[in-house]
Amino acid sequence: MSASWGKLFFQLVLLLASCGHINTKTPSPTSPSLDPISPLPSDIRRVVLKGESHTEKVELLNPVDLALECIWSGNENKSPNITGYWRKDGEEMQSIRVTVQLENDKYTLRQVFKIVSKENLGSYSCSFGDEAKADFLLAGPQIGEVRDKPIVSYVGDSVVVKCKMDEKKPKPASWNWYKANGTDKEQIFYAAEPQKYEIKNHEWVTKLVVHKLTEGDSGFYYCEGVYAVSTTMGHVELKVITFLEPLKPFIAIIVEVIVLVAAILIYEKSQSKKNSAGGNETNADQTNTPTPGDNNGPEESSSTRQRKV
Amino acid sequence: MNNHGPKAKSHSGEAEGPNGDWSWVLVGALFISTGLVFGLMRIMGIFFVEFVNYFEESSQSISWITSISLATQQFFSPVATALCNAYETRAVVMTGGFLSGLGLIAASQATCLVHLYLSMGVITGLGWALVFTPMMATVVANISQRRALALGLGLSSIGIFSFTLSPLFQLLVEMYTWRGALLIMGGLSLNIMVCGALIRPQWCSKALKKVDSKPRSSCATVLRRVSSYLELPVLLERPYLTYTATITIFNAGYFVPYVHLVALSRMTGFSEYQAAFIMSATGVTDILGRVTTGWFSDLGYFRTIHLLSLWVVLAGLFIILLPVSSLTGSYAALMAISLLYGFCSGALSSLVFAVMPMIVGVERVMGALGLLQLIESGAGLLGAPLSGLLKDMTGNYTVSFIVAGSFLIVGTLIMTTLPHYFSRTDPPPPHRVPHDVKDRGVHLELEHINNSPSDTSPKGAQ
């Protein structure tokens, strides 16, 4: 008897000790279940199963007590009881397998999940026996604008890579940047190389500035917006080119200009040489147009023609 | 010159004189060079977003680049025309082409905004100044038959170039970023040198001034020569002043739709693509307007100046109707009015230049156009910001468009005060004698021009 009292006393002490912790509204992700005092906000997602299966996307940013409810109207033989169970990321959660009663011609399966950290996100499925199934995809919000065309820049120049979150959704608490290294291997940026990288975050927008570009800096860059429980990832491609690239069409155009100008001038010279044999005086007269005495002629004279109104 | 008659004619078709084949080569040169000047200026908007992102400056700072280049082009126009009067037009235009290319090439290496202001703004603007007005004046002075059509064709390139080069430069910016695209743009601008090469030296109509045989350059002589190259005396004439005032007021309202039409469409609730499409469609009718009105004006049924007034009044009316049609919220209405506006604005812009010889006489067109560009530049600079200010004050574009349209209508009223405005035929062009030419022979020649029968025949009328 005293042993059980002792155990109880011990548990009470433990309880009081844990209650004594000052807890903020959002529990830290590392201690998921130590907050009996301040309840989480609650939310409910309900799915009515029609046909075989259904997928529902749920966007979560902050910790929440999420109630997921599946309602199924059953099949031809409405058995009074059916086993309802939940799966997370494909693995069955054995502890919450229940037997569902048929009520009002429907089976209702409801479960509350505490979402407090990244591990709690994922794919939750409710199943009625082997017959009907619905999926809830719990994830962070989609990144706002994703630029599908690569950002181009030059060797030695600096470039700004930008990621923007949809302004209708709340701001991420922080941002991380990753660079793709080989196949799917990602490395995190820090201000470890401040001359090379600079991260500027401002509300919904994060900018990564890369200085002194080299061709090795080409590739995919990933921006990750961090929320309390979830993250969201966007990607941008960077392409670094040398100045020789636009120089090639440029030189082609220069050559064309030189060729044309030379052609025109040569043509004109050859024309005037041809005519100088016959009309040397004509040439001279036309260049010194208003010489006196010449201008009493009729409109045929070219000088007058020049000024015909 | 009589005895050289047949030889003069056979001095190859190239110098068959104005209205000959070579004139149309000049129109082609005008086409290309004007397109490379104003067409490129219009496409500068493509770089706008890139600059804002790269230099992290406000849109206002970036839009100064275009303003500086336009202002420089107009401000230095009299200098350009004076240089043409003093030296060869060909050299001036080729230098201008070189400078405009150089400015853009330098801009491709820019590391700060001021660098862009100086290169893309000042140097390129200066280059454009040395190109546009001299080429315009050359064509105006050397074509008398079908002048308006020639000008319309020559100026139609602005719309055509901005229409076709727009997607091309968008692609270049994607492939090579703005630096590479600017480099290539600079290379393209160098093609203006080709156009300049097409101007034959002896066609400079200011050869008149070469008669001045005083080699001594005393201060007074130099000043007088400079003032004659700049055509400053023309500023003292009432017709010219009236016309310049008119065009200046036109300029205050004329550019407003180009700057604000997209914003107006977006405000009415249309998407980016719909708004851009309205602009493109307006550009197409602009081209049509230029060419059609040129052709129609040359038929001679009406005086060019009356047609000009008509198009201006209509353009002003349509500008006023633009916000009204947007109030109805109908895309079709806005599109229809924009198309009509585009047609009228294209029509009036080519006729503005065609009327000039009638006001000042052909031999002074070069300098007169230069001064006109300078004077009208002030209004052009102020027009768009004024409209923006009105929009900020009232919250929408209705008032600013109404004001812009009324500028055009007021300008037309002023234009009616020109001498002989209400007469049915063109008056004889003025024959002021340039005051540093003492040659009696020249005076005789000028009188001869004025007595030539070209005035009374409808074909020759402006």
Image: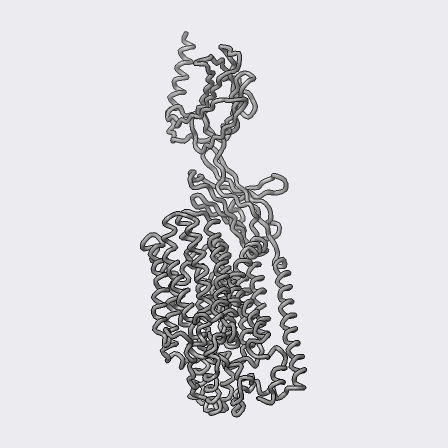
The scheme the figure's colours follow is one colour
Can residue B293 be seen at all in this image of the molecule?
yes
Name the one closer to the observer, A111 or B456: B456
Residue depicted at x 67% and y 79%: A270
Name the one closer to the observer, A20 or B79: B79
Name the one closer to the observer, A264 or A150: A264
Residue depicted at x 55% and y 55%: B167
Question: In the shown orientation, is residue A118 left or right of residue B246?
Answer: right
User: Vertically, is A241 above or below B128?
Assistant: above
Name the one closer to the observer, A102 or B424: B424
Can residue B366 be seen at all in this image of the molecule?
no
What residue occupies the far left of the structure in this picture? B394
Question: In the shown orientation, is residue A125 left or right of residue B378?
Answer: right
**Quadrant assignment, res A27:** top left
What residue occupies the far top of the structure in this picture? A1
User: Vertically, is B297 above or below A72?
Assistant: below
Counting from the top left corner in percent of width and height, residue B295 is at: 50, 67
**Quadrant assignment, res A66:** top left
Counting from the top left corner in percent of width and height, residue B152 is at: 50, 67
Counting from the top left corner in percent of width and height, residue B432 is at: 42, 84
Residue depicted at x 58% and y 76%: B20
The N terminus of chain B - image quarter: bottom right
Counting from the top left corner in percent of width and height, residue B450 is at: 45, 83
User: Vertically, is A234 above or below B354?
Assistant: above
Q: How many numbered markers are drawn?
A: 0
Question: In the shown orientation, is residue B303 left or right of residue A156?
Answer: left
